[in-house]
Amino acid sequence: MKTIDINCDMGEGMGNEEAIMPYINSCNIACGGHAGDTAIMKSTVDLTLKYDVKIGAHPSYPDKKNFGRHAMKISSEDLTTTIENQIKALKIIAESSGSKLHHIKPHGALYNEAAKDKSTAEAVLNAINSFDDNLFLYAPYKSIIANLALDRGIKVIFEAFADRAYNDNLQLVNRSIAGSVLENKEDIYEQVCSIITQQRIESITGKQLHLEANTICIHGDNPKAVEIVKFIHQKLNSNSHNIA
């Protein structure tokens, strides 16, 4: 039976971290780029220790105004520097709390751009290369950043999304399009099961696509995040799926 990790984006000002933590295996903590600050990072790290959840840094374009959801015109060098600074801020807090970083997962527009644009992907990977070689990268299957990371010897964990719709090219449907964010928990569970058991997902146009993933993300800023993550956790357990 395949073992699956459930992850969630945390520390983004939603205030639902403790309600979600018991039902996930790893989390991605905002590092001040699109959301979060030192106090929020510290309180979120404390919760990961309480609930034994792996810590990931969730760096983004430095754009709190737009929650990191718009690509920015920024030099590769400056992008690498801001990502390094964000990761370092969380790394210091994690280590001072007696823990450590497990992975890196870019946020929002940075995640999407790095999945398809080589220059953006390399800027992200240059930042990751300045840290511990044991850090994992959470990245989409068959994405440019995943392929480049593997070429560099960076360990990649393929990620898929429980609550987002996919285009025919395996990229996420833009949030401005109706149906891009899934909110019905039964539909979300069906998508998760298809990914886990069949390595398949249905695109927004109805095409069946091959998709591999060892971690599944449920967005913490989904209005029904707490309800969804509880439901998914319970359903997976009751159907004998191994949760990491």
Image (cartoon, rainbow, N blue to C red):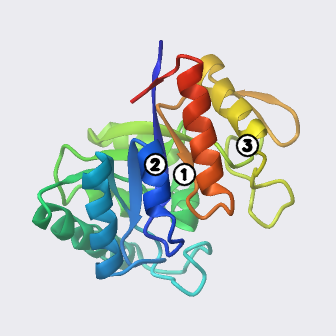
Which of disc 3 and disc 1 is earlier in sequence? 1
Residue under pointer 1: 115
Look at label 2 and name its amino acid: Ile
Name the secondary structure under disc 2.
helix
Residue under pointer 2: 145
Q: Quadrant of residue 43?
A: bottom left
Which residue sits at x=46%, y=77%? 35
Q: Quadrant of residue 67?
A: bottom right
Name the secondary structure under disc 3.
helix
Q: Position of residue 66 (x, y in %)?
A: 60, 82
Q: Position of residue 7 (x, y in %)?
A: 47, 46
Which residue sits at x=54%, y=36%? 141
Q: Position of residue 135 (x, y in %)?
A: 25, 47
Real-space Cα separation, disc 1 to disc 3, in angstroms: 27 Å
Q: Position of residue 112 (x, y in %)?
A: 58, 58
- In this view, which residue lies farthest toward the top? 1
Look at label 3 and name its amino acid: Lys
Real-space Cα separation, disc 2 to disc 1, in angstroms: 5 Å
